Image: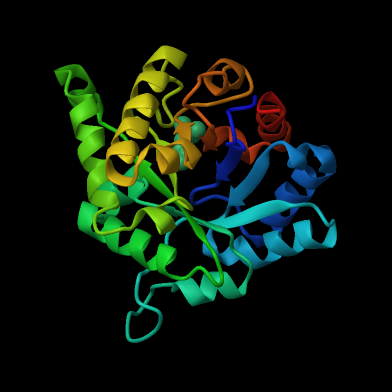
């Protein structure tokens, strides 16, 4: 699915799943089922837990397959006394090309605020010598959806995430619209619902960075995306790919979604 100059991105968010051996098997299955030339038309990435990043990277490297690897979170300080945290230089050194930031599960269970998300996005975009593109997650809860104020809510999340960031570096960032009511519920947003918010996000990006930059930036949809519904979602003009949870843990489903983006 071609969207002007935007190359679609299909990214798997493995969340807290797969021990090291399981991760290597899953990565190898994905590698085996992918045709290398698909990657000319669609960018593909998987985001496993930290403990699996290096082995999963190595599987794709060994197969010379241009599937990117991303972290699911990162801390904004480069090093120091921050027990339990992982830094940008650490994930960069093992080959990460992407990093999910501000996933709703991190906001909900680990108290991540819009300010934390902004610090992480700023830190990731500051280092362009070892570029790691942030995948910035936004999306409303069911109660916000039902209140009718979801566009205002998502607009504020996007503005907060990108506060203080210049247009020339912002263009490397990716935004993922993930309505919380659609995550892991099997209740996917309809293509029209997803398009409405993704188009509003592009308007916000245009107001922040100018229309040219907004037209370059990729906006993904996430929330119960699978091989059955990917085609229609990816066909929407402002949806440039997907962030896939559950369906990314099954190689055949994930690869079918990649095919739907071609
Ligand atoms: P599901 O695809 O399991 O609904 O998860 C979506 C998600 O949260 C991806 O980040």
Q: Quadrant of the C terminus?
A: top right
Q: Is residue 144 left or right of residue 34?
A: left
Residue visible at 20% across and 33% down in the picture = 153
Q: Nearer the viewer, residue 177 or 24?
A: 177
Q: Could you say where residue 93 lies in the image, as x and y percent from the top left?
A: 60, 75
Q: Could you say where residue 1 lies in the image, as x and y percent from the top left?
A: 65, 24
Residue visible at 47% across and 42% down in the picture = 217
Q: Is residue 186 above or below residue 178?
A: above
Q: Nearer the viewer, residue 259 or 49?
A: 259
Q: Quadrant of residue 119?
A: bottom left
Residue visible at 45% across and 50% down in the picture = 171
Q: Quadrant of residue 131?
A: bottom right
Q: Is residue 201 above or below residue 39?
A: above
- Residue 113 appears in the figure: no
Q: Is residue 100 left or right of residue 55?
A: left
- Residue 173 appears in the figure: yes
């Amino acid at each position: 699915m071609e969207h002007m100059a935007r190359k679609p991105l299909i990214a798997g968010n493995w969340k807290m799943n797969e021990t090291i051996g399981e991760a290597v098997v899953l990565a190898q299955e994905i590698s085996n089922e992918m045709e290398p030339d698909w990657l000319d038309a669609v960018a593909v990435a998987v985001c496993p837990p930290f403990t699996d990043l290096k082995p999963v990277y190595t599987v794709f490297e060994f197969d010379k397959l241009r599937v990117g690897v991303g972290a699911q979170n990162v801390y904004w300080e480069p090093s120091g006394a921050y027990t339990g945290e992982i830094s940008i230089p650490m994930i960069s050194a093992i080959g990460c090309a992407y990093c999910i930031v501000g996933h709703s599960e991190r906001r909900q269970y680990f108290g991540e605020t819009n300010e934390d998300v902004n610090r992480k996005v700023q830190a990731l975009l500051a280092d362009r010598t070892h570029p790691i593109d942030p995948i910035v997650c936004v999306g409303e809860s069911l109660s916000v959806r039902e209140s009718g104020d979801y566009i205002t809510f998502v607009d504020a999340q996007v503005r907060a995430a990108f506060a203080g960031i210049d247009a020339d570096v912002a263009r490397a960032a990716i935004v993922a619209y993930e309505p919380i009511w659609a995550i892991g519920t099997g209740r996917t947003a309809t293509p029209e619902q997803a398009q409405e918010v993704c188009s509003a996000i592009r308007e916000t990006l245009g107001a922040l960075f100018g229309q040219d930059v907004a037209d370059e930036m990729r906006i993904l949809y996430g929330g119960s995306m699978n091989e059955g519904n990917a085609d229609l979602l990816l066909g929407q003009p402002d949806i440039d790919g997907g962030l896939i949870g559950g369906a990314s843990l099954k190689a055949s489903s994930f690869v079918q979604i990649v095919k739907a983006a071609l």
